[in-house]
Image (spheres, coloured by chain):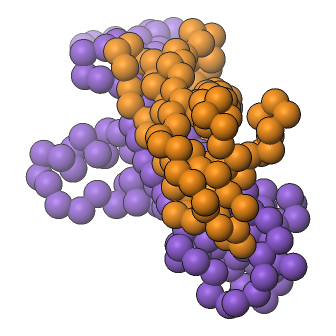
Amino acid sequence: MTQGQVQLVVSNTETIPGMTIVQSLGLATGSTVRAKHIGKDILAGFKNIIGGELKAYTELLSEARNEALNRMLADAAARGANGVVNVRFATSSVAGGAAELFAYGTAVVVQ
Amino acid sequence: MAEVANEGDVLGLILAIGIPVLLTFGPIAFSAIYGSYYQKGKMKKLLEREKGVGGSFKDPISNLSTPVNNQKILNSSLMWESVVIGPSWWQMLLGWIGSIFGGRLNAFTDTYDWARREALQRLREKVISSNFDDVINLRIETSMMSSSNKSKDKTAAMEIVAYGTAIKYE
């Protein structure tokens, strides 16, 4: 994954496979809150009659998660890290069909 | 009644009863019949795709924190895929009835099973198409979207995210 000019290695394991961590720079976080689109919501309501995947929401959340992840990477890059380890995702629904997506991990310097 | 009702009256009676009944139970019947047909079709497609990965049974995904074999690793990257799933009206109704008596709710089992496996299968396909060999430290997370009891919004959606570290061997 790239962020600006810096090449960041991202992993959800405690170490980055094939590399060694030389310095830990603390927690890097990124979050975004997204609300549902009313038009898509109506379509999703129809899709709900037969059940199955709600593609509009899948896309919406993918976009939002990418944004949260990019913000986390920007945070890590601002600390001078070149990697983020132990990345976790968290989701919580805020009032009225909005969702908060949160990504966090430890910013590290790897070699 | 002395007279036999003529054809117009019978038709009127059928319409008078039929239309309200159709409007009331039509959507739920459609949901029950077409919904299960649709979801079964999706499951069949998924089973075929699952067979396609790796030919013989070699699953690239594991939830171990380190790779099993001591091969040298070239590079790694975080990868994730998600599915948002909503049960059909019919399933919601069955679930509601089931929650009166408690116990097992078979109506939901297949749908959620499909969604979780679909998320995993998408991850597999993404990893293979981006030229990685394996996924380690897989995590599956679920979260409810929307549908608090107070809101008018009746869509009940569950999001399933599968994420892990994709690795490429030298």
Q: Is residue B45 visible?
A: no
Compared with A72, A44 (above or below) is above
Q: Quadrant of residue B10?
A: top left
Q: According to the colouring, which chain is purple?
A: B
Residue B23: image x %, image y %? Answer: 45, 19
Q: Quadrant of residue B151?
A: top left
What residue is drawn where x is 85% and y is 34%? A5
Compared with B29, B20 (above or below) is above
Q: Considering depth in this image, is B67 or A21 the residue closer to the camera?
A: A21
Left or right of B168? Residue A98 is: left
What residue is drawn where x is 67% and y is 57%? A110
Compared with A29, B119 (above or below) is below
Left or right of A108? Residue B157 is: left
Which quarter of the rendered picture does the C terminus of chain B lie within?
A: bottom right
What residue is drawn where x is 46% and y is 24%? A99
Q: Please identify which colour was used for chain A in the image.
A: orange
What residue is drawn where x is 53% and y is 44%? A25
Q: Is residue A94 visible?
A: yes
Which quarter of the rendered picture does the N terminus of chain B lie within?
A: top left
Residue A20: image x %, image y %? Answer: 65, 67
Residue B85: image x %, image y %? Answer: 52, 42
